[in-house]
Each structure stands twice: as C-alpha cells, then as structure tokens.
Image (cartoon, grey):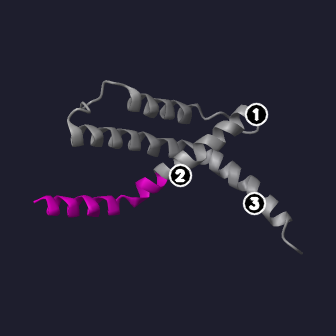
Amino acid sequence: MARMSTWWLFRRLKTRVWAVKRIGRALKLFLPMTRDVLRGSFRPIPWSAFGLMALALAYLVMPFDLIPDFLVMIGVVDDVLIVGWLLNRVDTHLSEYRNWKYAEETPAASSHSPS
C-alpha cells in the first residue's frame, strides 16, 4: 500500500511541476524586487505581493495551523500546501516587476555584444 501511495504522490507532483516552478520563480524574484523597491528604482510598489509573502511567512511561524504540526505528516503537508499556494499567488503579482526587470536587462546585454 505504501508503494502505491508513493507512486501516486510522485505522479501527482509530476503533473504539478508548473506550480513548483512558479513558487521557485517567486522566491527568486522577491528579494531583488524588494531591493529595487527600497532603492526607489521600481515603482509602483506591489503591495499585494508583499502582503502575500508576509502572510506565507506568518503562517509558517504561527503556532496555530489549520492542522496541528504534531500530527506529523498531515500537519507538515498542510503547511506546504498553504504556503505553496500563497507563493504561487505571489508569483502572479510579480509579473509587472518581471517585465520591468527583463526589459531592463535586455538592452544592457545587447549593448555589450560586438557589432
């Protein structure tokens, strides 16, 4: 039975690779975006992304969960699912910053190429 559930979990994660990639992308972009906002080089400030990230961090450190962590596997899965969902939402709110950041990097990269 355990082998079957492991296989099911693996297949389920494999079909959700896009969500894992979005979570990674959100984590990778959030700190540079925060730096650019604090420096004043990126406006408007994406308050929704900051709010969702704060909510995700608060949920991780908060002693009260939907499912208590002392229920070993279920409590941890609860945290992973909720924080993952929140980080997925953060990624959707970073689209303006992503467009600005990559548009900023593209001309700099092409100006260094030999003519």
x, y percentage for residue 67?
24, 32
**Is residue 5 shown left or right of residue 96?**
left
x, y percentage for residue 22?
48, 52
Q: Earlier in the sequence, mark 3 or mark 1?
A: 1
- Against 4, residue 80 (above or below) is above
Q: Secondary structure at mark 2?
A: helix
> What is the crowding at mark 2: few (fewer than 14 residues within 10 Å), some, or many (at least 20)?
some
What is the distance, in whole Å, between disc 3 and disc 1 at their CAs?
A: 20 Å
In which quadrant will I find the N terminus? bottom left
Q: Which amino acid, by three-letter code, is at mark 2?
A: Arg
* Residue 40 numbered tag: 1
* Residue 106 numbered tag: 3
What is the distance, in whole Å, between disc 2 and disc 3 at their CAs?
A: 19 Å
Q: Which amino acid, by three-letter code, is at mark 1?
A: Gly
Which residue does the numbered mark 2 point to in the structure image?
25
Q: Earlier in the sequence, mark 1 or mark 2?
A: 2
In reply to whether residue 21 is colored magenta, the answer given is yes
Q: Residue furthest left?
A: 1
Q: Secondary structure at mark 3?
A: helix
In reply to whether residue 11 is colored magenta, the answer given is yes
x, y percentage for residue 36?
71, 39
Residue under the image location 39 percent in, 43 percent down: 85
**Is residue 33 shown left or right of residue 79?**
right
Q: Which amino acid, by three-letter code, is at mark 3?
A: Thr
